[in-house]
Image (cartoon, rainbow, N blue to C red):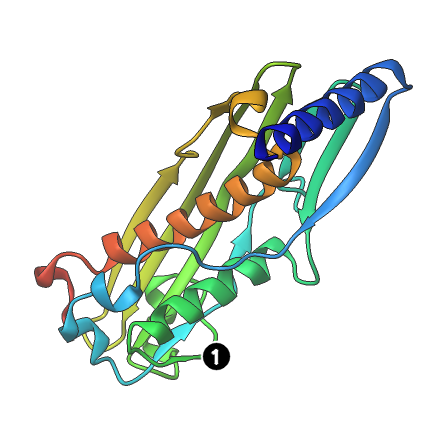
Amino acid sequence: MRTDKKLLRGAAAFIIMAVLWGCAASRVQRRINLRYEGPKPTALLDPSVQAFPEIIVTPFVDLRKDKGSYGTYDWGNLSVNYIPGPESVSQGFTRLVKEFLSNAGMRPVPGEWNGQLDTLPNIAAEHAIFGEIERLDFSGRGRFYEAKNQGTIRVVIKWGNRGARRIITRTVEVAPDRREFHLFTTNYNHVSGMASLIRKTVSRAIRESMTRLFRSSSNRGK
């Protein structure tokens, strides 16, 4: 019975692909709602960092020209544009950082800071985070027997310490962990899979940004 169901699913997928290849080109949009996926933040940050009473997280600055897209996936005559959900890319990144720090035992609070040293004494808390999205673009192409994906996320994260009048800057660039899969051997839904790949890579960018920023005990300067 299971074998029959697998054969039916495979046949249905083949028919759908054949139809798409034979039809006129079409463009659709798929919304992505970001969520953190990965190890628990408490296991990644040192307890001395987690003891920060308050830390300002300013809205991320999206430096890209195409701020309304994560990337595209082409499958035959179908082109899928992955766009933000109810929040912008900048808002999504900012929320994930706040949630990451909150789940690590820190207390993120709203506030303003432009990432510059001369404005650091004016922030309303002892610590502040400022971030810039320099690059975020994904692309993929599917064929009958396989699909390939690629993408890059590059963010610049700054941690300002008001008391020490010091700024720590980290640039993090990540790419998807999985770039290729075989459609009929994995029964992989590649359009949904591309969305999942984007979410996972964004989570990895947030995770690596925060852990690299707070990694060195000599940099903490509480």
In the figure, 23 relative to 113: above or below? above
Please state the horizontal and vertical placement of residue 196, each as a whole percent of the image.
Answer: 54, 44
Q: Name the quarter where the C terminus is drawn.
A: bottom left
| In the displayed structure image, the side of residue 50 where residue 56 appears, left or right | right
Asked which secondary structure carries label 1, the reply is loop
Q: Residue at x 47, y 68 (%)?
A: 58
Residue 147: horizontal and vertical position, in percent? 57, 21
- Residue 101 image position (x, y, % from top left): 35, 70
Q: Is residue 112 left or right of residue 84?
A: left
Rendered position, 202 above or below 153: below
Quarter in which the N terminus is drawn: top right
* Residue 123 image point, x, y percent: 38, 78
Front in this rendered view, residue 123 or 135: 135
Residue 217 image-quadrant placement: bottom left
Residue 211 located left or right of residue 150: left
In this rendering, position of residue 144 left or right of residue 180: right
Which residue is at the far front?
1
Write the residue at 49% across / 42% down.
Answer: 134
**Residue that mark 1 sits on:** 110
Residue type at tag 1: Pro
| Nearer-the-camera pick, 117 or 179 | 179
The total of numbered circles placed on residues is: 1
Q: Quadrant of residue 87?
A: bottom right
Image quarter of residue 174: top left
Residue in the foreground of this view, choosing between 64 and 16: 16
Most distant residue in the right direction? 24
> Which residue is found at the position 28% from the left and 80% from the top?
126
Q: Label 1 crowding class (10 Å Cα cut-off): few <14, some 14-19, many 20+?
A: some
